[in-house]
């Protein structure tokens, strides 16, 4: 099976992990700071806080900006469920907004319509790896006094003109799950310009404590206070060693993903009814996901049939995502995001990762062509 996404681990990663295992620190040691510093510098942000998942990163962000019961946070319909769940962790209410059909990025005009006196923030997802329309979101946020959070879990390494993902919103979260751009097995990071938010998240990831184990061990004494809530969301030194090692190879991987996406675009050009999403002007896409729409009205084949046929041919096609409004938990929003719900029937994720080859891409596109052809001869089953 050609997976839709997967990690790339080499000897330098293994060496880095072994070195961490042999060191004095397995968790909350110097490798955490090193990885945070490297991520801050890569994303051109002032502060980076490492945590043990992308979901924990979103939760830390919601706590840092003060989301509490009664508050509303606007999130896009086309995203992983964690983007909305994190609002609920704080007792807040996620309000689901529709997306643009060409990009599946949150629709700023729909965001505007969903603002109420209780709205505190917007979480926009840089879906598939390209930045959302942060200029439009920024002007709405200014008008209504909202905080902008980027769920950047797809978009590490993307830019909009000269600004990196990490600088486009007030706070940006990343995930290091193995399908993402770089991995720490499980892991996440938040980057921001605001030092008080960064300090708050450092406490929140460590039980709400004012000092961490290393600070107490290295001479500040045993005392600490717990001024507010917290969890154990720490990322270990072993994982941070892997993260730093992976991050060093990211520029090459981004180039590989971009070349692979161009190859897909070229090869799919003459396949009618299989359309790639659009890339916004002036953005450099990070290509976490290669998403196409399967246009049933053009060739008579449904997305689900195409999905099953490709799986039979050893192609790990996937779907990102079931729109939030179609999930039972958020069913009170059903019918309110027609674009996401319509696109949710058509979208298909094709394999794209750091090590995919041109031959594999040709095999995927030839397979799509053959499935469409066979279908037009034999009819859809
Ligand atoms: C992967 C992902 C998350 C969650 O990250 P985990 O590290 O799996 O917790 C959140 N939002 C989006 C958009 C993601 O792709």
Image (cartoon, rainbow, N blue to C red):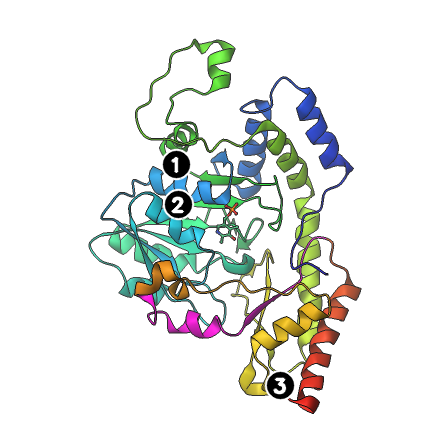
Q: Is residue 145 above or below residue 341?
A: above
Question: The C terminus appears in which quarter of the rendering?
Answer: bottom right
Whether the magenta-drawn stretch holds residue 313 is answered as no
- CA gap, disc 1 and disc 2: 8 Å
Decide if ligand 1 comes within 8 Å of the CB at mark 3.
no
- CA gap, disc 3 and disc 1: 55 Å
Q: Is residue 311 found left or right of 218 in the rendered image? A: right
Decide if ligand 1 comes within 8 Å of the CB at mark 1.
no
CB contact under 8 Å: marks 1 and 2 = yes
Q: Residue 379 appears at what percent x and percent y? A: 64, 89
**Which mark is first along the chain, 2 or 1?**
2
**Which mark is first along the chain, 2 or 3?**
2
Q: Which mark is residue 194?
A: 1
Q: Which mark is residue 140?
A: none
Residue at far front of view: 381
Q: Secondary structure at mark 3?
A: loop
Q: Which residues are magenta?
A: 333-354
Q: Which residue is mark 2?
A: 170
């Amino acid at each position: 099976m050609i997976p839709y996404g997967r990690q790339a681990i080499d000897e330098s990663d293994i060496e880095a992990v072994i070195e961490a295992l042999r060191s004095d620190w397995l968790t909350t040691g110097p490798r955490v700071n090193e990885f945070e510093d490297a991520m801050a510098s890569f994303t051109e942000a002032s502060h980076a806080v490492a945590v043990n998942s992308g979901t924990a990163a979103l939760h830390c962000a919601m706590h840092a900006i003060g989301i509490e019961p009664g508050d509303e946070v606007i999130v896009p319909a086309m995203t992983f469920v964690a983007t909305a769940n994190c609002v609920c962790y704080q007792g807040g209410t996620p309000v689901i907004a529709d997306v643009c059909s060409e990009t599946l990025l949150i629709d700023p005009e729909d965001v505007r319509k969903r603002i109420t006196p209780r709205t505190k923030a917007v979480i926009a997802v840089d879906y598939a790896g390209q930045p959302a329309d942060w200029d439009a979101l920024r002007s709405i946020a200014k008008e209504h006094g909202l905080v902008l959070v980027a769920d950047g879990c797809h978009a590490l390494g993307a830019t909009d003109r000269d600004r990196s993902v990490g600088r486009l919103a007030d706070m940006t979260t990343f995930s290091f799950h193995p399908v993402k751009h770089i991995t720490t097995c499980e892991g996440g990071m938040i980057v921001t310009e605001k030092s008080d938010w960064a300090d708050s998240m450092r406490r929140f990831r460590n039980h709400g404590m004012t000092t961490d184990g290393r600070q107490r061990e290295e001479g500040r004494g045993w005392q600490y206070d717990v001024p507010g809530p917290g969890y154990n969301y720490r990322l270990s030194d072993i994982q941070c060693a892997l993260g730093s090692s992976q991050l060093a190879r990211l520029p090459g991987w981004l180039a590989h993903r971009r070349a692979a996406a161009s190859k897909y675009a070229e090869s799919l050009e003459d396949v009618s009814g299989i359309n790639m999403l659009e890339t916004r002007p002036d953005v450099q896409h990070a290509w976490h996901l290669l998403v196409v729409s399967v246009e049933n009205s053009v060739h008579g084949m449904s997305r689900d049939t195409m999905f099953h046929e490709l799986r039979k041919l050893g192609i790990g096609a996937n779907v990102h995502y079931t729109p939030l409004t179609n999930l039972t938990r958020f069913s009170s929003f059903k019918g309110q995001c027609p674009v996401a719900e319509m696109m949710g029937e058509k979208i298909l994720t094709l394999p794209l990762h750091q090590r995919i080859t041109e031959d594999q891409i040709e095999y995927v596109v030839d397979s799509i062509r053959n499935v469409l052809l066979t279908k037009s001869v034999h009819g859809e089953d």
